[in-house]
Amino acid sequence: PPPALPPHTITSMAQSATLSSSMKERLKKLNRIIKQFFSLGSKPTPATFPELPDCVLWLRFSLAIIYGIYLGPRAGAFNGLFGLNIVTFVPIMYCQLMLVADMDSYTDQSLHFVGVAQSIGLLMLVWLFGFTQVHAPEEAKLVAAMIVQQVVQQQQNGNEDGSTGNPDEFDAAAAAEAAVDGTVGAAEAAIPVEQSEF
């Protein structure tokens, strides 16, 4: 006869079977929600599709990430305003025109503006991250200028107190600034400059 399994092994096997059945239930529910969200002309209401506000929220998050990546190196208030319009009005148009949803019947959460503020914040976060990555040479120049300014300020404070200060510190800061300028110049030459359309 086969050897008997220890009791803790049997318990863990039962728990994993329960876990897999609950995971199957969740996947079935997720599949149903996705199918319902993309079934055009389904006329959802809170009774037939209570998950619609959550789907609109995730649609707004997806649009914010995609548009934020697209904006990456670009700057300007017009792009931010256009992002606000995309994140706000594209999901509303999808719900009204494609799903033919009864938007006013969702009284618990307004479908018109659910997650707009969070989506705008996410869009700005992705946009600023991309913009900072593209403009790394300017950031390096700013850091070098701040270091030199701090050293000069320390030199001036030392002279006011009657002490001579440390000239090696100032020379090191000047050398660091020159090195950063050389690195920044090489980086700027390697990065193609995109001309603004406006």
Image (cartoon, helix red, strand yellow):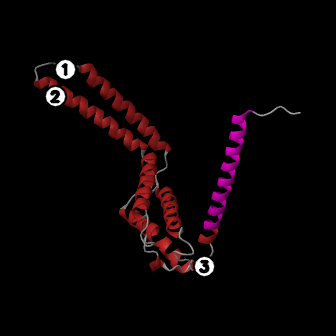
Residue drawn where x is 67% and y is 45% of the image: 15
In the rendered view, does 169 fall on the left or right side of 127? left
**Residue beneath disc 2:** 156
Residue located at (57% from left, 78% from top): 98
Residue 137 image position (x, y, % from top left): 41, 42
Who comes first in sequence, dot 1 or dot 2?
2
Seen from the viewer's position, the closer of residues 182 and 160 is 160
Looking at the rendered structure, the secondary structure element under dot 3 is loop
- What span is colored magenta in the figure? 6-33
Residue 25 percent location from the top left of the image: 66, 58
Question: In this image, 107 relative to 94: left or right?
Answer: left
Q: Amino acid at mark 1?
A: Gly
Q: What residue is shown with label 3?
A: 42
Q: Which residue is mark 1?
A: 165
- The tag earlier along the polypeptide, 3 or 2, is 3
Amino acid type shown at disc 3: Ser
Task: Using the image, tell me which numbered label, if any, was put on residue 47.
Answer: none
Compare marks 1 and 3 and give the one earlier in the sequence: 3
Q: Residues within 10 Å of mark 3 (few under 14, many from 20)?
A: some
Q: Amino acid at mark 2?
A: Gln
Residue 198 seen by the camera: no
**From the viewer's perspective, is the residue at label 1 or at label 3 nearer?**
3
The quadrant the N terminus occupies is top right
